[in-house]
């Protein structure tokens, strides 16, 4: 067993990378601010549609560029079919890419959207918060869970 | 959109159910205590091997018994092949069962175990903490993430 884990930061926050896929300029602003407050040492790669996000992941694989360790996906980009298309592609692109946990952020509380997202292999489904304070709270929880509790895949390729 | 979500408890903590699959009596004691402290209103169903866990889920489907909303899985039961076998079965048993997020709790920090777990569709991989205080901290984070931030599948069938 390779027990090199740092107790309060198993994923070594520094230099980690998150891929954010969001088409709303307003929500992107809130997400960027919340990321800056909570994930101070995490680089966020922002994409506004599923095609450029898949292209970016393909490019990472081809060039050896460091993959993101977590993907935040807006489901409606602007239709949910865009989010479904991203999920289908990302889970079949390459085993290393398929392992990256995807957290859906959506305005929708529709139970079909929730069920279909879990069916398509998302790690979790979060309804977008209502105001900036809540966004910050949510990202703080995300950090405590994904960076300080969970061991993410591809941690070895972070440096 | 059915926005009936309660801000700080989207999954309505009361009467929720977690399935815990753990073969170590010591760890089970720690988990039970941590659950009692953090998930006061959550019913934990405890199974000590993958066969009885799958049997329980099959029984839920056959009898209409309420499914768990989250599964905590010890990977080595006692071999990791037992954990892999559970993951293969649970993801193919039934769409509703396959949607339940599985959080692996393991002593292993082995990168192959982590990668293989994410390959097999786990929502996240957590290395078991070292002492009771840490177990309680981890379960507090789990509660804040899975019960107060995320929307879990099958929430409609909780009552």
Image (cartoon, coloured by chain):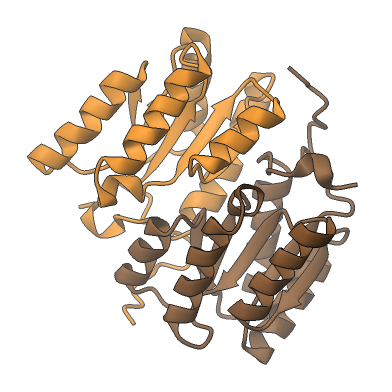
Chain colours: A orange, B brown
User: Is B142 on the left-hand or right-hand side of A99?
Assistant: right
User: Is A150 on the left-hand or right-hand side of B41?
Assistant: left
Residue drawn at x 55%, y 80% is: B130
The answer to whether A81 is drawn above or below residue A68 in the figure is: above
**The one of B17 and B133 positioned closer to us in this rendering:** B17
The answer to whether A143 is drawn above or below residue B46 in the figure is: above
Residue drawn at x 70%, y 59% is: B140
Residue drawn at x 36%, y 65% is: B116
User: Is A157 on the left-hand or right-hand side of A123?
Assistant: left
The answer to whether B55 is drawn above or below residue A122 in the figure is: below
Q: Where is residue A13? Give x, y as percent.
A: 38, 50
User: Is B135 on the left-hand or right-hand side of B112?
Assistant: right
Residue drawn at x 78%, y 76% is: B33
Q: Where is residue B3? Give x, y as percent.
A: 78, 21
Choose top left, top right, bottom left or bottom right for residue B143: bottom right
**The one of B101 and B38 positioned closer to us in this rendering:** B101
Residue B106 in view: no
Choose top left, top right, bottom left or bottom right for residue B154: top right
**The one of A16 and B5 positioned closer to us in this rendering:** B5
Q: Where is residue A60? Give x, y as percent.
A: 17, 37
Q: Where is residue A116? Give x, y as percent.
A: 58, 34
* Image quadrant where one finds the N terminus of chain A: bottom left
């Amino acid at each position: 067993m390779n027990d090199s884990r740092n107790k309060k930061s198993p994923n070594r926050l520094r230099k980690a990378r998150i891929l954010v896929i969001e088409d709303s300029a307003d929500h992107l602003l809130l997400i960027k601010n919340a990321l800056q407050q909570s994930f101070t040492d995490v680089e966020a790669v922002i994409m506004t549609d599923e095609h450029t996000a898949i292209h970016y992941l393909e490019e990472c694989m081809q060039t050896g560029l460091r993959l993101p360790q977590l993907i935040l996906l807006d489901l409606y980009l602007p239709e949910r079919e865009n989010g479904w298309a991203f999920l289908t592609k990302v889970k079949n692109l390459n085993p290393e890419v398929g392992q990256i946990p995807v957290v859906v952020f959506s305005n929708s509380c529709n139970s079909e959207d929730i069920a279909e997202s879990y069916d398509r292999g998302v790690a979790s489904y979060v309804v977008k918060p209502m105001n900036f304070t809540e966004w910050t709270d949510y990202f703080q929880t995300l950090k405590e869970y994904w960076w300080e509790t969970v061991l993410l895949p591809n941690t070895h390729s972070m440096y």
